[in-house]
Amino acid sequence: MQEFVEFTLGGISVGMIYAAIALSLVLIWRGTRILNYSQGGMAMFTAYVALVVINHTGNYWLGFGAALVAGLALGAALERVVIRPVASKPPLNAVIVTIGLLILIEGVAGMIYGDQYRSFPPAFSVVGIRVGSFGLGVSPNDVFIALAVLAAALVLAATFRYTSVGLRMRATAFSPRIARLLGVRIGRVLTLGWALAGLFGALAGVLVSPSTFLYPNSMDSIFVLGFTAAVIGGLDSPAGAIAGGVILGVLLNYVGGYLGSDLVQLFGLVILVLVLMVRPSGLFSTTAARQV
Amino acid sequence: MSEAAALAIENIVAGYGGGPVLDDLSISVQPATITAVLGANGAGKTTLLRTISGFVRPRRGRIVIGNTNLARRRPEEIARAGVAHVPEGQGVITELTIEDNLRLGALIRPAADRAAALDGAYERFPVLADRRRRLAGTLSGGERQILVIGRALMAAPKVLLLDEPSLGLAPRIVAQIMAVVKQLRDDSGLTVLLVEQNARSALSIADRGIVLNLGKIVADADAAELATDVSLRRHYLGF
């Protein structure tokens, strides 16, 4: 019983990391139908920015903030400079460009920071919480991870629902043509979408790096699992991204706990293939055809 | 003719690749008038509206509103210059609520004006007020048409382009929509370009009628005159 509780709670926490990456992918996919293969690389790079700031200032939260700002800036810059020229071209162009970006970002990170595994400080204690003699299987840092992603997602949801900016983003995602007819500057909306995706990627990078260590390829497998989470939830659905992340995190934690940690990556891929075969649109996607 | 035109289309050549659909077209539309644009399928009526609103880039010519040439600008900039285009086949965003569809229409206006614009839309179209929280996808065809016109008006446009607003709708709803368009011309000085297959109903509310054939103007007259010109009607308008 204790194991089950530990695996479930731990799975929720790590699932929220997958959810953050999934949310980044959904933000970009909804507006542009582009799958950003460089999302993990962007997250890794902004985690390095955080580490540099933390090491220089001794202040974790300054580094945390710096990563988020770097994520916003990196996302916006990439959209304007690299992605905008290929957005209206055949989809394969964007695939090649984002894969190329991933290789470029990882190469540049390696050149600047080197290949060695660097330790990354957690925000809070990583000692497991115990209730009496009952171990919960999560630490204060794990709780922070889950709450941070949840809070960011709720702020995003409120922005979508209640603000003019959010309305513009939703309209552009559902029907860019109609949005343009109504005067929405969809170029700016798409830049904002990429900036927010960069922000959520940065959040994931900073939150996961304490347990994975930071090195140029450290986010590659997280990206695959984040992508899987997005597919589970439906690439169109921000709520689905969160649900997909949590479901995946919990399932894989059961696999790792009961069957062995070397099977986790394999099961992640198995789940991805299964979802693509059985319900490729995901659990939460809207089935209506996309208007253009 | 001393009044400046609300919309001046000057020597427009436009098409989709291959030969031009609009062939050196010039139209001058006076403010606070309804101009019916008529003609058979393929005459260029929809292309004309798309060229004005920016979805078709004209190869040559000018499109002037106020003192600004809008030809070859992006659709969103043309919308911000005061052109509201209601395309054929409605164009509600089905995943948004009625209220969100309407609010979207007002986003180019200053924030202070948006609430009043929304109230105005609900007053003008009570059927939208009753269903404001429902998804636009749940509306009937007639209700959707009312929604897109209401949404277009939220921007307080100078020029309204209506493409086949009566398509597939019951006559009662068509009459209601036409009455609203007339009232807007009378009360708000709105300038309207109305493309219609249903020439009879279009001419009944229009001030002027233009008949297109193969991208050129073949008739341009007072609507009442056009409605009574039997040979023209039979030849181009089918009644």
Image (cartoon, helix red, strand yellow):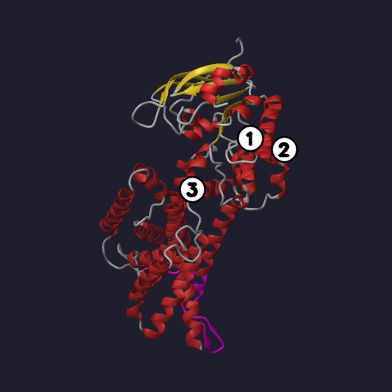
Q: Earlier in the sequence, mark 2 or mark 1?
A: 2
The answer for which chain carries disc 2 is: B
Badge 3 marks a residue whose secondary structure is loop
The answer for which chain carries disc 3 is: A
Where is mark 3, residue-wise? A291
Dot 1 alpha-carbon crowd within 10 angstroms: few under 14, some 14 to 19, many 20 or more: many
Where is mark 2, residue-wise? B124
**Place of residue A61 in the rendered image (x, y in percent of width and height, measured from the top left):** 48, 61
What secondary structure characterizes most of the magenta part?
loop
Q: Is residue A63 visible?
A: no
Q: Is residue B119 above or below residue A133?
A: above
Task: Tell me the distance, in whole angstroms, between the alpha carbons under discs 1 and 3.
Answer: 22 Å
| Left or right of residue B102, residue B67 in this image | left
Q: In front: mark 1 or mark 3?
A: 3
Asked whether the residues under the numbered discs 2 and 1 touch, taking CB atoms below 8 Å apart as contact, a structural biologist would say yes
| Left or right of residue A159, residue A88 in this image | left
Badge 2 marks a residue whose secondary structure is helix
Where is mark 1, residue-wise? B153
